[in-house]
Amino acid sequence: MTFTDEFVTRSIETLNALDQSQIEAVVDRLVEVRERQGRLFLCGSGGGAGHASHATCDFRKLCNIESYAPYDNVSELTARVNDEGWDTTLVNWLKVSRIDKNDGVLIFSVGGGSEAKNISMNLVNAVNFAKSKGATVVGIVGKDGGHTAKKADACVVIPPVQGDLVTPLAEGFQAVIWHLLVSHPKLQINTAKWESVNEPGSVAVK
């Protein structure tokens, strides 16, 4: 078996092992945030930060949810890291945004953060702070989900079907799942461009 064969096989196994009820639970929590006219703050580190930036666009454009990716502003991020430390970067951003019970936080993380292991404490602290303000917390995480899965109101845990592929499969399926979310009929309000131009009677894009 080539590595490509193995990766595709593990991807199929991961997809088949997903708990679809977890996805539906996240959908319902996000619908509630929009119905409350709350804001959605999307948080992650590394690949998760990249996902947060892209997903913010999709939730705003397709779902009409006012959404923000705190780490998109590199000037503020680096100022906070330099002056206040990494672990409080998200908490202090959320404080300035006056996060409250109407709002939501979506976490993208492979491990979900761990207080005991002192891993991804920026996310751990963000989850704790959001919960203390009564905000809704949801996540799309890998492995056992760590702190995020334990504290979130709803969380999709991507099952680890292969130990040495945890990170690429978790981050890959985070993108698949958030695209599922913004395409879900309960959430999507505006049709994506290429779906709209392929509808019968639509005007072709030149």
Image (cartoon, rainbow, N blue to C red):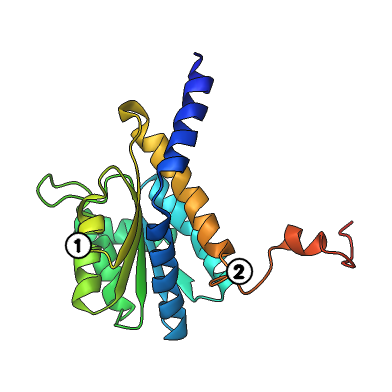
Residue that mark 2 sits on: 62
Taking 131 as reference, is 116 above or below it?
above
Name the mark nearer the viewer: 1 or 2. 2
Is residue 59 found left or right of 149 in the rendered image? right
Query: Which residue sits at x=45%, y=67%?
Result: 27
Taking 123 as reference, is 142 above or below it?
above
Residue that mark 1 sits on: 125
Relative to the observer, which residue lies in front, 113 or 182?
182
Q: Can residue 144 be seen in this view?
A: yes
Q: Is residue 71 visible?
A: no
The amino acid on which the numbered mark 2 sits, given as a three-letter code, is Leu
User: What is the residue that sits farthest to the bottom in this orientation?
Assistant: 36
The amino acid on which the numbered mark 1 sits, given as a three-letter code, is Asn
Give the percent coordinates (x, y) of residue 204: 89, 60
Q: Residue 83 carries which label?
A: none
Give the percent coordinates (x, y) of residue 8: 52, 29
